Amino acid sequence: MIACGLATHYALNARLPMLEERLGKLVTDDASIIEKALAQYCDFVYPDKRSIIWKIGAIDKCFCHDTIEEIIHAVESEAADSYNVW
């Protein structure tokens, strides 16, 4: 989920109840305080070299176009220019 941009933090299932309790007790909208609370219970994730996260710039560049034809052309060009296996 982090690699796809659908999540910003990762916590083990065992820590979720503690994280929920901690966040539930916060009475603030200060992002730095919320971030500190998240940091207490969240884990660092180091995506493997095959992870899509390493290609996110190319994906954004290709899919920013308005038409399917432009997107396909951009993907084909990126694949030809990058010499990377997709």
Image (spheres, rainbow, N blue to C red):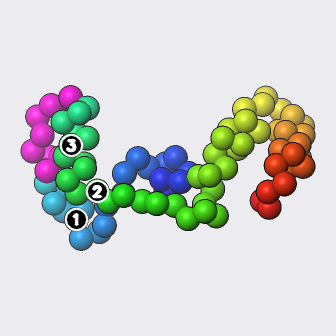
Amino acid type, label 3: Lys
Label 1 neighbour load within 10 Å: few <14, some 14-19, many 20+: few
The answer to whether residue 35 is left or right of residue 50 is: left
- 2 or 1: tag closer to the N-terminus: 1
Q: Which three-letter amino acid code belongs to the residue tagged 2?
A: Cys
Per the image, the residue denoted by label 3 is 36
User: What residue is shown at x 32% (from left), y 60% (from top)?
Assistant: 43
Q: Depth check: give the residue in front, 51 or 83.
A: 83
> For the residue labelled by badge 2, is the local secondary structure a helix, a strand or a loop?
loop
The picture places residue 15, in percent across and down from the top left corner, at 22, 65
Asked whether residue 74 is drawn in magenta, I would say no
**Reading the chain from its start, which is encountered first: label 3 or label 2?**
3
Cα–Cα gap, marks 3 and 2:
10 Å
SS of the residue under disc 1 = helix
Residue type, numbered disc 1: Arg
Q: Is residue 20 visible?
A: no
Q: Residue at x 15, y 31 (%)?
A: 28
